Image (cartoon, rainbow, N blue to C red):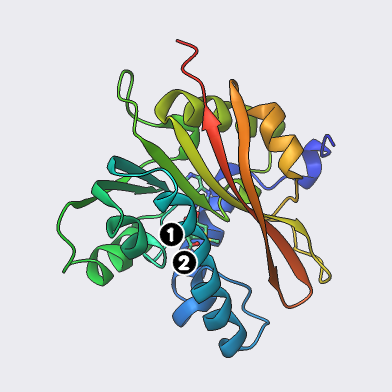
Amino acid sequence: MKVQATQVPAPDEIADEWRRRAERPGLARVMRASQPAELAEGTTVRTRQLVTHHLRSLGPIGSALEIGCGMGRITPVIAAQADAVTAIDMTPRMLDLARAACAHLPGVEFRQSAVQRLPWRDKRFDVAVCVWVLMHVLDDDEIARACRAIAGAARHLVLVEYEHADIPVGRYSRLRDLDDYLALLPGSRLVERHELTYGGDRSFAALIALEDLR
Ligand SMILES: C[S@@+](CC[C@H](N)C(=O)[O-])C[C@H]1O[C@@H](n2cnc3c(N)ncnc32)[C@H](O)[C@@H]1O
């Protein structure tokens, strides 16, 4: 599953791509621009339902970490289940959009960070939520670093990622199976998995328990 070094865009190029995507209209900022708006809206409803389902199954949640919050599409449903939400994203413009979209929500704070370099040493959130972000961490070493950072930062993870795409996903995405992520996340155990189909694409929505290995 190693990608040739020459195929992986450089970090600056990846950051530029996300700056560009943040200027698209509506949900095309965080979803496939080529698919119809109704499909994006329907998939957003279903994604929010699955995230809510997994979060509710955990019982009361004190602190939640949203990783790669984008324009704040999922943030409100996390805030509905948790006392406090910290949402990170590496793209400043996405964070501006999310702050504006979630200004009415109490207990939500936004912070710029890459998932590979989470800023906490000792903090452990009750749950992390990560929707269609890790597929954009292309490099083998970087994804390993990102998964170690998540496993150190949360007790559970709600993870939504593509496993299969009918239309090629392009050079800024890399599909991995749920088993690949479980192997990359130290101390992880699958609790529950659902399927999420989107046009010809198939994602999984998984609840994963993360053992404290520190
Ligand atoms: C496809 S969008 C998904 C956004 C949101 N999770 C949602 O489902 O609406 C991916 C987001 O991840 C962010 N992102 C990509 N790579 C990242 C990284 N390594 N660390 C943090 N954020 C990242 C991008 O800036 C973008 O906002």
Residue tagged by mark 2?
Answer: 48
Q: Quadrant of the C terminus?
A: top left
Indicate whether 135 appears above or below 199.
above
Residue at the image position 34 percent from the left and 26 percent from the top: 124
The x, y position of residue 189, in whole percent, is 62, 29
Q: Quadrant of residue 186?
A: top right
Question: Residue 163 at what x, y percent from top left?
Answer: 76, 54
Q: Residues within 10 Å of mark 1 (few under 14, many from 20)?
A: some
Rendered location of residue 90, percent (x, y): 42, 48
Quarter location, residue 122: top left
Horizontal arrangement in the rendering, residue 88 relative to residue 14 (left or right): left
Kindly identify the amino acid type of the residue bearing the numbered disc 1: Thr
Question: What type is the residue that disc 2 sits on?
Answer: Arg
Dot 2 alpha-carbon crowd within 10 angstroms: few under 14, some 14 to 19, many 20 or more = some
What residue occupies the far top of the structure in this picture? 214
Report the quarter where the N terminus lies: top right
- Give me the residue at 57% from left, 88% from top: 37
- Residue 48: where, in percent of width, then height? 47, 66
What residue would you read off at disc 1? Answer: 52
Tell me if label 1 and label 2 are in contact, CB under 8 Å: yes
Residue at 71% in and 32% down: 140
Mark-to-mark CA distance, 1 and 2: 6 Å
Q: Nearer the viewer, residue 101 or 151?
A: 151
In the displayed structure, 47 sits above or below 38; it is above
Dot 1: what SS? Answer: helix
Looking at the rendered structure, the secondary structure element under dot 2 is: helix
Task: Tell me: is circle 1 under 8 Å from ligand 1.
Answer: no
Let me know if residue 191 appears in the view: yes
Q: Which tag is nearer the camera, tag 1 or tag 2? A: 1
- Whether residue 141 can be seen here: no
